[in-house]
Image (cartoon, rainbow, N blue to C red):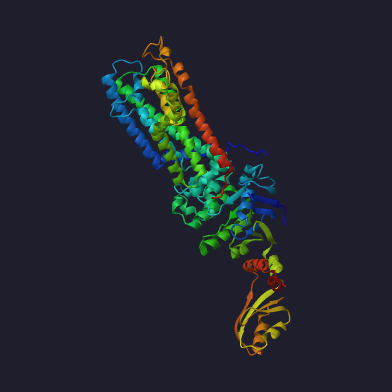
């Protein structure tokens, strides 16, 4: 049976309301401050590092995102860690919060479909994350121009903007996951604990576990081990398993975009490097070709998680 | 009776094997206050949610203002106002802002919003707290704010789910007056409750739910005749009277006398036989302790009806 009327009706209203809630909420202010301070500190140290250690590089500005000293993690590393936290903070009580406040049935008795509520909330969360990331991007680039005194080249701008898009997809994956949890659990506390648990597992534990699993699936060949080399099959399995974690995908994609001399992700045989000029940058289109699978996986993750939540939400009882 | 605004035929809702609403038929006429009564879990709220298209209908049909809520819920929800059981609002927003959000979801033109919100808040006597955060509101005020939303919507049908549960007596009386004022402006009201005396005060017709079925339906007076039998129930309590049964039975108009424990008698008569009963007690040398007449209250109808259900033999005699 077809229902009548547009599922988009009310999306804009929900979006504006949720966005204003997010922007003015304490938890968002705290996270924004955190991002801002971390951004400033990290960029300050990378600028100092770049001044001392990078005499000449066509992509100095991009180094701001990736360079790291032994004492301070790179901005990229911090982002891969902080973004899930922000996304979870924005999404964990999206739907169950409405149930718990008992506003759900009242809002759904207005002439809108559930689609509008879910879509509006997701887009508002994504927009909030987008605003934060754009601000951070402007901050980093601005500080870089100011302290390094080098104007960005068009390619640097293009690369860092593409990086911004990938970062947003990464944030969207975690946001969709948090909203999915807010749909399937009735308590916000459960949702946030599960989300943080999965986040910690995927970012901290999974990279340690994955090689072990890979070694059981494809046991290392003793001949390679004797030579002190990794067995290619085991290495590939380990890498594929690590890619289950969105943060690994994100770091792979971001590194490729921000360091133009990245030629391949994964194992490379010596003969493949024949004729390559070491350290020579790739054009943007080549870098994009390398990260295409990662980008598709991240964006696909957003859609799969969102659709999963959507299906559950449509069938859910309104009654609390 | 005016043309019906809500028509249900064979309306059924099953959750797995459990039947929440079982082939219910009813009509609600334009401008009447219709009460859905019954114990918790009898299917009242489920029936309401089906009217609004907020839960799927398993079988049967329902039509609200000529629309099918299954196919075209937006058209129904544009014209019907719903006050859920224990309505919730966004605590961090003011009363006005909460209504403004609903108004935008309803699609009210922005320049009309302000006037309609003020008017609605004045109608439910919340104008002086319009700019206060809802967090500070009492249960009764929240309930009234929910009613303001319906007023603002200019709904043709108001569906109120347990609107007075949890209110203090004063707030209940005020709220019932507001419901009656809705009726005066031509709004049809559908009210669900288990507070029988209140329903009796305001409802034109009631439907009694039991385990998903409507077991009784009609105006309160007609139900009283149907369940309690025609006329008045007089209770007499008297000590040391001799042969009181026979004397009471001999009073003209009394159709039955029943001893209900100790020295208490219950008479069923076609008129108020209290004076005659008093004379009969005196004539029997009894000491009259109590003499009362039951108004045909819904409470009595309700408890008597369920009594009849559990012990048909005794009930039949009572109702005779």
Name the spot of residue B126 as percent of width and height, x first: 50, 54
**Where residue B272 appears, x then y in whole percent?**
68, 77
Query: A246 or B319, which lies in front?
Result: A246
Q: Is residue A257 visible?
A: no
Quadrant containing the C terminus of chain B in the rendered view:
bottom right
- Picture layout, residue B40 above or below residue B317: above
Measuring from the top left, give residue B238's x and y in whole percent. Answer: 61, 84
Q: How many marks?
A: 0
Q: Is residue B246 left or right of residue A12?
A: right
A235 in relation to B166, above or below: above
Quadrant of the image occupied by residue A79: top left
Is residue B296 visible in the rendered image? The answer is yes
Q: Residue lying at the far left in this picture: please name it.
A: A52
Indicate the position of residue B50 as horizontal and vertical percent values: 64, 49
Report which quarter residue A203 is drawn in.
top left
In the displayed structure image, the side of residue A103 where residue B37 appears, left or right: right
Q: In the picture provided, is A278 more to the left or to the right than B112?
A: left
Residue, x 40% and y 14% (percent of image)? A270
Side (left or right) of B215 relative to B132: right
Tell me the quadrant of the picture where the N terminus of chain B can be found: bottom right
Would you place residue B246 above or below residue A246 in this image? below
């Amino acid at each position: 049976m077809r229902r009548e009327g547009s599922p988009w009706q009310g999306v804009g209203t929900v979006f504006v309301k949720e966005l204003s809630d997010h922007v003015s909420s304490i938890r968002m202010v705290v996270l924004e401050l955190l991002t801002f301070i971390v951004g400033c500190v990290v960029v300050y140290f990378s600028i100092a590092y770049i001044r001392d250690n990078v005499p000449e590089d066509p992509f100095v500005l991009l180094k701001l995102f990736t360079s790291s000293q032994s004492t301070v993690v790179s901005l990229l590393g911090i982002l891969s860690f902080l973004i899930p936290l922000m996304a979870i903070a924005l999404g964990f009580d999206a739907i169950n919060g409405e149930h718990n406040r008992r506003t759900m049935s009242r809002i759904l008795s207005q002439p809108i479909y559930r689609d509008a509520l879910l879509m509006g909330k997701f887009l508002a969360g994504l927009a909030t994350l987008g605003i934060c990331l754009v601000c951070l991007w402007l901050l980093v680039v601005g500080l870089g121009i100011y302290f390094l005194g080098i104007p960005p080249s068009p390619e640097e701008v293009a690369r860092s903007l593409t990086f911004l898009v990938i970062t947003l997809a990464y944030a969207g994956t975690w946001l969709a996951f948090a909203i999915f949890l807010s749909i399937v659990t009735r308590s916000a506390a459960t949702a946030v604990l599960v989300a943080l648990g999965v986040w910690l597992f995927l970012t901290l534990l999974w990279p340690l576990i994955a090689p072990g699993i890979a070694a059981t699936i494809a046991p290392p060949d003793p001949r390679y081990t004797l030579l002190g080399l990794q067995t290619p099959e085991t290495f590939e399995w380990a890498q594929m398993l690590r890619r289950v974690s969105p943060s690994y995908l994100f770091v792979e994609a971001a590194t490729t975009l921000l360091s133009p001399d990245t030629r391949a992700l994964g194992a490379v045989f010596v003969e493949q490097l024949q004729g390559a000029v070491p350290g020579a940058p790739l054009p943007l289109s080549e870098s994009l070709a390398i990260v295409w699978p990662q980008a598709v996986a991240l964006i696909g993750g957003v859609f799969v998680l969102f659709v999963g939540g959507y299906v559950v939400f449509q069938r859910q009882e309104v009654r609390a | 009776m005016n043309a019906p605004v809500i028509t249900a035929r064979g309306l059924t809702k099953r959750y797995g094997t459990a039947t929440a609403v079982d082939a219910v038929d009813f009509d609600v006429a334009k401008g009447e206050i219709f009460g859905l009564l019954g114990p918790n879990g009898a299917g009242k709220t489920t029936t309401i949610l089906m009217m609004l298209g907020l839960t799927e209908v398993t079988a049967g049909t329902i039509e609200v203002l000529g629309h099918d809520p299954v196919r075209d819920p937006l058209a129904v929800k544009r014209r019907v106002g719903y006050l859920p059981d224990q309505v919730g609002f966004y605590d961090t927003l003011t009363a006005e802002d909460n209504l403004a959000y609903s108004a935008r979801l309803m699609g009210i033109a922005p320049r009309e919003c302000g006037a309609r919100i003020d008017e609605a808040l004045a109608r439910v006597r919340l104008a002086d707290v319009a700019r206060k955060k809802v967090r500070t509101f009492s249960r009764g005020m929240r309930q009234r704010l929910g009613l303001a939303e319906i007023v603002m919507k200019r709904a043709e049908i108001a569906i109120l789910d347990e609107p007075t549960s949890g209110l203090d007596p004063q707030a209940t009386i005020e709220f019932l007056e507001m419901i009656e004022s809705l009726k005066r402006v031509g709004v049809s009201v559908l009210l669900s409750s288990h507070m029988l005396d209140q329903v009796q005060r305001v409802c034109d017709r009631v439907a009694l739910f039991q385990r998903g079925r409507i077991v009784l339906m009609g105006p309160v007076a007609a139900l009283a005749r149907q369940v309690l039998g025609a006329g008045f129930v007089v209770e007499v309590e008297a000590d040391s009277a001799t042969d009181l049964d026979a004397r009471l039975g001999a009073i003209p108009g009394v159709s039955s006398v029943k001893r209900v424990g100790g020295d208490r008698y219950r008479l069923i008569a076609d008129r108020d036989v209290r004076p005659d009963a008093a004379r009969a007690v005196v004539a029997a040398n009894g000491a009259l302790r109590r003499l009362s007449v039951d108004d045909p209250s819904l409470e009595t109808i309700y408890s008597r009806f369920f009594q009849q259900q559990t012990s048909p033999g005794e009930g039949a005699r009572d109702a005779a």
